[in-house]
Amino acid sequence: MQSPVSGYTHSLRSLAAILKTAATHCDDRSIDPDVLLNARLFPDMLNLIRNVLIACDTAKGLAARLSQTENPVFEDSEASFEELQERINKTIAFMESVPEAGFEGAEEREVVLKFGPEEARFMGSTYLSNFAAPNFYFHMSTAYNILRHNGVEIGKRDFLGAA
């Protein structure tokens, strides 16, 4: 399997740029950043912070699982735009440290995820295409949509990032 790292780090860098725009939006309009950081699209959905953390965890998890590398544990204590930027940077740094050779044969490697007492088993290629990628982009899109819904001037090009 070719390493999926570059596509995910590209998207995480786009997310970092979007968060920087959101922080500037707050500064320019004298908005308490906590308003955006804790915003949700609907009351039973996760807030901006949680969506960013899950996008990061999904990205680092896929790199670790597919390469059979130790998945670092990051505390989920981020509460500011600056701390979210640090989390994204730590995630990217970990992902880029995974050797390309670690992904050789990953499409046929079994991936086991635990959800409390339940577990899900995937072949590597199915895990990537049917679980990790949709989960990652769901949380990326939700973070983007929370900010866009709250008036942050971002668009599709911001989500896609620089070519």
Image (cartoon, rainbow, N blue to C red):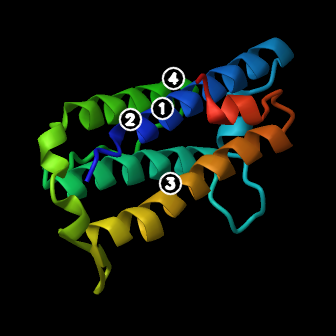
Identify whether 123 is placed above or below 15. Answer: below
Location of residue 100 by image quarter:
top left
Horizontal side of 153 relative to 64 (left or right) equals right
Give the labeled residue for mark 1: 10
Evaluate if marks 4 and 3 touch, with contact meaning CB atoms under 8 Å apart. Answer: no
Q: Nearer the viewer, residue 140 or 47?
A: 140
Identify whether 149 is placed above or below 107. Answer: above
What is the distance, in whole Å, between disc 1 and disc 3 at their CAs? 13 Å
Identify the element where label 4 is drawn: helix
Q: Amino acid at mark 1?
A: His
What is the distance, in whole Å, between disc 2 and disc 4 at their CAs? 23 Å
Q: Depth-wise, is mark 2 or mark 4 nearer the camera?
A: 2
Q: Which mark is residue 142?
A: none
Crowd class of label 1 (few under 14; some 14 to 19; many from 20; radius 10 Å): some
Give the labeled residue for mark 2: 6
The answer to which of marks 4 and 1 sits earlier in the sequence is 1
Horizontal side of 118 relative to 50 (left or right) equals left
Q: Position of residue 133 (x, y in %)?
A: 47, 58
Q: Amino acid at mark 2?
A: Ser
Q: Residue at x 27, y 67 (%)?
A: 124
Give the labeled residue for mark 3: 136
Q: Which mark is residue 82?
A: 4
Identify the element where label 2 is drawn: helix
Evaluate if marks 2 and 1 touch, with contact meaning CB atoms under 8 Å apart. Answer: yes
Evaluate if marks 1 and 3 touch, with contact meaning CB atoms under 8 Å apart. Answer: no
Q: Residue placed farthest to the top in the image?
A: 28
Q: Amino acid at mark 4?
A: Glu
Q: Residue at x 72, y 37 (%)?
A: 36
